[in-house]
Image (cartoon, grey):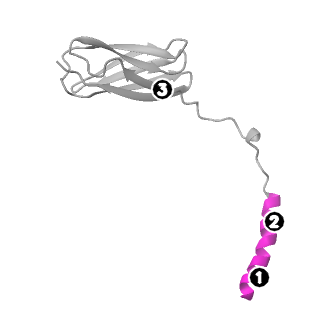
Amino acid sequence: MKLKRASLILAAPVMALLAVATPAVSASAAPAAAHPVKLPCRAWMSNAKPKDYSTIDVWVATARDAAVTTVAHYKTTSTKHTGRANSKGDAGIAYRISDATPGYKVNVSVSVTAGRSGGSCSTSFVPHR
C-alpha cells in the first residue's frame, strides 16, 4: 500500500510540470493545410437501361467550371470522354451506345478537377437490345 501512495504522490508534481512545460497550440497558429480541398462529385445516368444504338448522358454535379473526365468500362473496351462543368457546376457527357454487350453492367468512373483540387464518383448503366 505504501508503494502505491508514494507513486501517486510523485506522479502529481511530474504531471503538473508537463502541463506547464508543454505549450498549447491554437488552431489559428497551425500551418495551412497541405492537402488540396476535395471537390464534390455526384454522377447519374440519363437512362440506366439504354437501348443499343441510342445516346445517353452521364450527368455530373460538381464545382463550377471544373474539368470532368468520364470513362465507361465496357466488357471489352473502355471509352473516355471529357467536358467542363458550367457556372452552376453541372456537366453532361454524351455516350453513344453501339453494339454494347446486352445485360453487361457498364461502370462509369468520373473524375473532376479544378486547380489543385479533385474528386471522383461513379455511376453505371446496363445496355439492352
Q: Which residues are magenta?
A: 1-21
Amino acid type of the residue that numbered disc 2 sits on in the rendered structure: Ala
Q: Position of residue 99 (x, y in %)?
A: 18, 16
Front-most of 41 and 36? 41
* Kind of residue sitting beneath label 3: Cys
Image coordinates for residue 39, horizontal then vertical, percent:
53, 27
- The residue wearing badge 2 is 16
Disc 3: which residue? 41
**In the image, 82: left or right of 24?**
left
Residue that appears at 18% across and 23% down: 101
Q: Position of residue 35 (x, y in %)?
A: 59, 34
* Callout 3 secondary element: loop
Q: Residue at x 68, y 35 (%)?
A: 32
Which secondary structure lies at badge 2? Answer: helix
Q: Label 1 belongs to which residue?
A: 6
Residue drawn at (74%, 79%) of the image: 7
